[in-house]
Every structure is written in structure tokens, then in C-alpha cells.
Amino acid sequence: MKINFNEKEKSIEIKDGLKTQYLMIKVMLIFTLINSILFPVFVLDKKQLEWMGFIWIILGLASVIMLIYQIMKKSTSEKLNLSEISSLTEKQVFGRKRFSLKLKNGKLRDLMEMKNESDIIETKELFKNIGIQIS
């Protein structure tokens, strides 16, 4: 992951391939949703429909919920103006530190590829130097 600060435009540029990853997640969720609609209708017979249909309904609902979450709450912008960024947030998930930028429009921009402590310190210093709150 590479984060560049452009002083002239007052923006940061993040190159980490997150847009491609999220696009693949959205495509897989759409395929799962389509499959959860078509599979019970065309493939299952009436005996299997009771429990297999229930499983496919749950998968379809989970896909819809995750798609809505991806569209409404996640951002994949590679170029962000400083005026759009609210803060840098740090979470501990399964013992690993995860960072994301909280944007003023309510979305989160995940910073995925921070593998070692030096990357974390460097990123925190960059955002501290440009005046973004770290929480």
C-alpha cells in the first residue's frame, strides 16, 4: 500500500487495489443472490424445498444485507481531499490492528495492507502531520 500526500491539491492518494477487491466481493454477492433466487425455483423438487430452500433464502438475505452494507458504508476512492476525511480510526480485530479513514459522508475507507509496525507508525505520522485526527 502506498499513501501519497499532495500538498498542492490538499489530497491524499491511496494505491492498494481495494477497488478491485471490493468489486470482486460485490460480483460474488450478486451471483450468490441470483443463485439463491434461481436454485430453489428451478432445481429443487418439493421434498428438498423445505430445508434446502430455507438455506438458500438465508444465503440470499445475507447477500442482500452485505451488498447494501458495501454500497452504503464502504468507499473505494483512491483519491480523497482532506476536507472529505473526518478521522483515522484504529480497530483491533482478531488480534490484528485494522485502520480505516472515516469520511464526512459517513462511509469508511479501509486501509488494508499494513503488514508491520513500521507501516503503522509511518501512516499515523503522515496523518498526524497533515492534521487528521487519529482515534
Image (cartoon, rainbow, N blue to C red):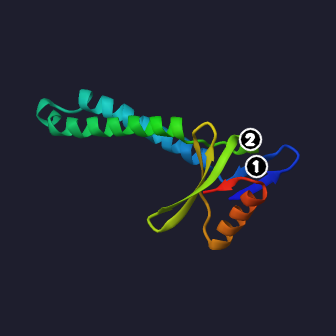
Look at the image and tell me in which quarter the N terminus lies.
Answer: bottom right
Look at the image and tell me in which quarter the C terminus lies.
Answer: bottom right
Q: Residues within 10 Å of mark 1 (few under 14, many from 20)?
A: some
Residue name at image x 70 percent, y 62 percent: 123
Where does the image place residue 57, in percent across and percent down from the top left?
A: 27, 35
Where does the image place residue 17, in percent across and percent down from the top left?
A: 64, 51
Q: Is residue 18 above or below residue 134?
A: above
The kind of residue on which mark 2 rests is Ser
Label 2 element class: helix
Question: Which one is in front, 111 or 23?
Answer: 111
Residue name at image x 44 percent, y 65 percent: 94
Residue name at image x 46 percent, y 68 percent: 95
Q: Earlier in the sequence, mark 2 or mark 1?
A: 1
Residue annotated with mark 2? 83
**Can residue 73 be seen by looking at this rendering?**
yes
Q: Quadrant of residue 111?
A: bottom right
Q: Are marks 2 and 1 in contact (CB under 8 Å)?
A: no
Report the side of 71 relative to 83 (left or right). left
Residue annotated with mark 1? 12
Label 1 element class: strand
Where does the image place residue 36, in percent across and percent down from the top left?
A: 32, 34
Q: Is residue 83 above or below residue 42?
A: below
The kind of residue on which mark 1 rests is Ile
Residue name at image x 16 percent, y 39 percent: 51
Q: Is residue 56 above or below residue 110?
A: above
Report the side of 37 relative to 52 (left or right). right
